[in-house]
């Protein structure tokens, strides 16, 4: 985690002290269940809770113990015993380290998912507001980067809204999939611990029971979680790239907000660079980079190894923290995005009416001209306009062969900009609902 791209709320989920507190909760809830089953004394379970819940866990002390024992969970249990006293012998009975580690990991991932879902809600709210604001603002649609046909800027934002709606749905599903608990003991057979302990801990920690866990929770769940973060990051980059293109000097249809006192270049005082969207592009690449190790973590030896552990200690905090930062930056970017309808109109007119070529093609076919001839007639008048040799509508009206099919009035009719926007309301209803 890099402080420059870290929000404290998300970072707190991955702090060592948070992890140790979750470990304690798992152990204490398991002790409660063991006491109810008569495996350990009820008074011992009460003591574990009473002396552990307010304990000031010392991260440095745990690290000191771990340097000796070379085992993080044993180091924690040793430190916990310093608070609990003799009844600490009843802690962790029948459990294995992965029961604590994996259940805690999934608690952290669900908390992170809740934050990311809230982040997506901010992005969606910003996109919806700006989409309705520019619902009918004419803009040029581009294919291959070349002017194609008219759209509205509101539609561009509606596309993004629909995409991030899908992202939210996927993340909700990924959260559900990863929200499982395993308290099944060595190699997952429950030989030393009753399955009812797992059920109790799962309920207490807001998780579902893992149906079968070998000694660890299956990593395909986590692979899906991080793959979902990767897809969300790709959507962030797609929107960021669109805005970057629209901010180019030759286009300048939209621009990142440039605050008072902000500087764009150390050498060129005139510069206003798309630094936020460029930053989002880079951050998105980093989130996606963590998908591959998450996928590779699915493949472990037999009932358990720890080849996944070192990778997860890096990828989980980094991926969630980075995406959290990126989504919040994106929401603010959209909220403050400076939009230039006048420049959009200039760009619409830049090709001298060529953007209406499909309407001319269709109109000719409806008048009895073959499609091949229609295409030839429209294209031969379009190519001179590309070379700056006239206006499209004027050239069409001078084409004697074309005039056999269309009158001047019928030609002019095909240049109506509003024709392209007659179904905008329908699209908006599909995306945003009737309201």
Image (tube, grey):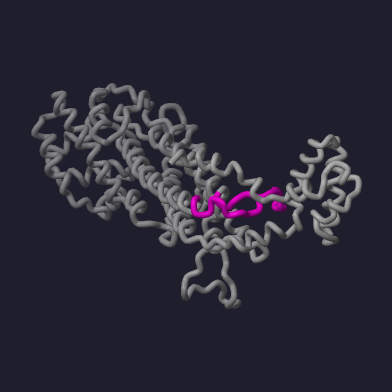
Q: Nearer the viewer, residue 268 or 96?
A: 268
Residue 233, x across and y down, in percent: 51, 47
Quarter of the C terminus within the rendering: top left
Q: Is residue 330 magenta?
A: no
Residue 119, x across and y down, in percent: 40, 49
Residue sitting at 73 percent across and 48 percent down? 413
Q: Is residue 2 visible?
A: yes
Quarter of the N terminus within the rendering: bottom left
Q: Which residues are magenta?
A: 132-154
Q: Is residue 289 visible?
A: no
In the picture, measured across the screen, residue 18 lies left or right of residue 137, that is left
Task: Note whether 143 is above or below 89 in the view shown.
Answer: below
Residue sitting at 77 percent across and 39 percent down? 362
Which residue sits furthest right?
Answer: 400
Q: Nearer the viewer, residue 375 or 396?
A: 396
Task: Note whether 429 is above or below 154 in the view shown.
Answer: above
Residue sitting at 33 percent across and 53 percent down? 9
Residue 368, x across and y down, in percent: 84, 34
């Amino acid at each position: 985690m890099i402080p420059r791209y870290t929000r404290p709320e998300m970072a707190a989920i991955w702090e060592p002290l948070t992890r140790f507190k979750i470990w304690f909760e798992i152990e204490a809830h398991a002790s409660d269940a063991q006491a109810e089953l008569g495996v350990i004394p009820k008074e011992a379970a009460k003591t574990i809770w009473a002396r552990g819940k307010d304990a000031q866990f010392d991260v440095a002390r745990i690290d000191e113990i771990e340097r000796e024992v070379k085992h993080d969970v044993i180091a924690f249990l040793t430190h916990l015993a310093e608070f609990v006293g003799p009844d600490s012998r009843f802690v962790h009975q029948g459990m294995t380290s992965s029961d604590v580690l994996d259940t805690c990991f999934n608690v952290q991932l669900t908390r992170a998912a809740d934050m990311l879902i809230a982040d997506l809600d901010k992005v969606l709210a910003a996109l919806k507001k700006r989409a309705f604001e520019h619902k009918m603002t004419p803009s040029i649609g581009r294919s291959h980067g070349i002017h194609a046909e008219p759209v509205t800027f509101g539609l561009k934002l509606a596309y993004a809204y629909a995409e991030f709606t899908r992202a939210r749905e996927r993340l909700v599903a990924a959260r559900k999939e990863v929200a499982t608990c395993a308290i099944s003991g060595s190699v997952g057979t429950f030989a030393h611990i009753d399955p009812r302990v797992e059920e109790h801990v799962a309920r207490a920690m807001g998780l579902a029971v893992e149906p079968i866990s070998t000694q660890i929770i299956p990593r395909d769940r986590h692979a899906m979680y991080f793959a979902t973060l990767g897809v969300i990051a790709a959507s962030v980059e797609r929107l960021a790239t669109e805005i970057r293109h629209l901010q180019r000097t030759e286009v300048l249809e939209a621009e990142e907000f440039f605050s008072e006192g902000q500087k764009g270049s150390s050498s060129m005082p005139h510069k206003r660079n798309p630094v936020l969207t460029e930053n989002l592009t880079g951050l998105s690449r980093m989130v996606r980079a963590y998908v591959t190790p998450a996928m590779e973590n699915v493949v472990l030896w037999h009932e358990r190894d720890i080849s996944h552990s070192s990778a997860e200690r890096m990828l989980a905090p980094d991926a969630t923290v980075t995406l959290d930062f990126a989504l919040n930056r994106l929401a603010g970017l959209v909220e403050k995005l400076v939009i230039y309808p006048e420049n959009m109109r200039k760009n619409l007119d830049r090709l001298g009416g060529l953007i209406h070529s499909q309407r001319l093609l269709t109109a000719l076919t409806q008048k009895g001209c073959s499609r091949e001839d229609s295409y030839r007639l429209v294209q031969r008048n379009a190519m001179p306009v590309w070379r700056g040799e006239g206006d499209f509508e004027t050239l069409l009206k001078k084409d004697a062969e074309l005039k056999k099919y269309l009158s001047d009035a019928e030609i002019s009719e095909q240049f109506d900009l509003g024709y392209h926007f007659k179904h905008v309301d329908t699209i908006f209803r599909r995306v945003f609902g009737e309201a």
